[in-house]
Image (cartoon, grey):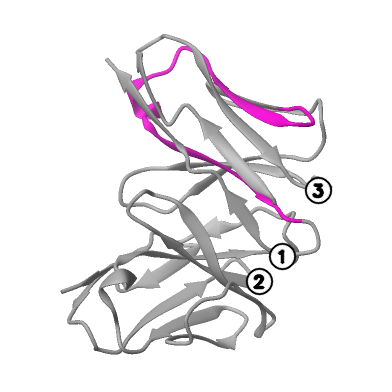
Amino acid sequence: EDQVTQSPEALRLQEGESSSLNCSYTVSGLRGLFWYRQDPGKGPEFLFTLYSAGEEKEKERLKATLTKKESFLHITAPKPEDSATYLCAVPIQGAQKLVFGQGTRLTINP
Amino acid sequence: DTAVSQTPKYLVTQMGNDKSIKCEQNLGHDTMYWYKQDSKKFLKIMFSYNNKELIINETVPNRFSPKSPDKAHLNLHINSLELGDSAVYFCASSHGTSNQPQHFGDGTRLSIL
């Protein structure tokens, strides 16, 4: 069964304290992996697409990496404004839909 | 310059009523989606339309009926609302197939009394 699992469920960091969020997946024939950020009361905001193992993408303090079984979202020297829920999603081959993980709720304390 | 817009943002209604949520996108995308996000924040697809044609229906009760009058609009009508329908409903759009990123609206929070 196609599945996407994110860990940890929640993460609390001090401002400037770097860490990583994990997204592991079991899908047949990976066609890409997406990272989104969701703020309270808002829709998911697209961050990155990764299409193949070894690929990396960066945006400000965020860097996403992809292996054959998982993806990491590294956050370097985070600021309070980076607090949000981070979601990863994988398209299912042969079906035009995304399967989302349950998200990691990230809180950055000043 | 809103990309994907949904109305209303909040919807509070009684059990048994019928209600509609509207969605419009100005990104020129040809595929639109409805998702349901439950109380545990888990996002699950309900429907997908490509060029006004239904391509995904994820075993959603037939009380839910999507309608796509054109490529830029996908509305969701819900009949005989039940308590379990309380959730946040998100509309999204993308170019073509599932390996293109989807862009989401800000959601409609539906509360059933």
Is the C-beta separation of discs 2 and 3 under 8 Å? no
Which kind of residue does numbered mark 1 sit on? Gln
| Marks 3 and 1 on same chain | yes
Coordinates of residue A59 in the picture (x, y in percent)? 59, 28
Q: Nearer the viewer, mark 3 or mark 1?
A: 3
Estimate the spatial distance between the alpha carbons at disc 2 and disc 3, rounded to whole Å.
Answer: 23 Å
Is B54 or A63 nearer to us in this picture?
A: B54
Q: Which residue carries the number 2 mark? A: B31
Is A40 or B28 nearer to us in this picture?
A: A40
The image quarter in which residue B72 lies:
bottom right
The image quarter in which residue B63 lies:
bottom left
Q: Residue furthest top?
A: A17
Judge whether residue A40 can be spotted in this image.
Answer: yes
User: Which structural element holds mark 2?
Assistant: strand
Coordinates of residue A53 in the picture (x, y in percent)? 81, 30
Which kind of residue does numbered mark 2 sit on? Thr
Q: Answer with mark 3 or mark 1, whichever residue precedes in sequence.
A: 3
User: Which structural element holds mark 1?
Assistant: loop
Q: Is residue B111 magenta?
A: no
- At 54% across and 44% down in the image, what residue appears? A101
Is the C-beta separation of discs 3 and 1 under 8 Å? no
Per the rendered image, the range of residues in magenta is: A66-92
Coordinates of residue A16 in the picture (x, y in percent)? 40, 9
Q: Which residue carries the number 3 mark? A: A28
Is the C-beta separation of discs 1 and 2 under 8 Å? yes
Coordinates of residue A77 in the picture (x, y in percent)? 46, 12
Which kind of residue does numbered mark 3 sit on? Ser
Q: Which residue carries the number 1 mark? A: A96
- At 69% across and 30% down in the image, what residue appears? A70
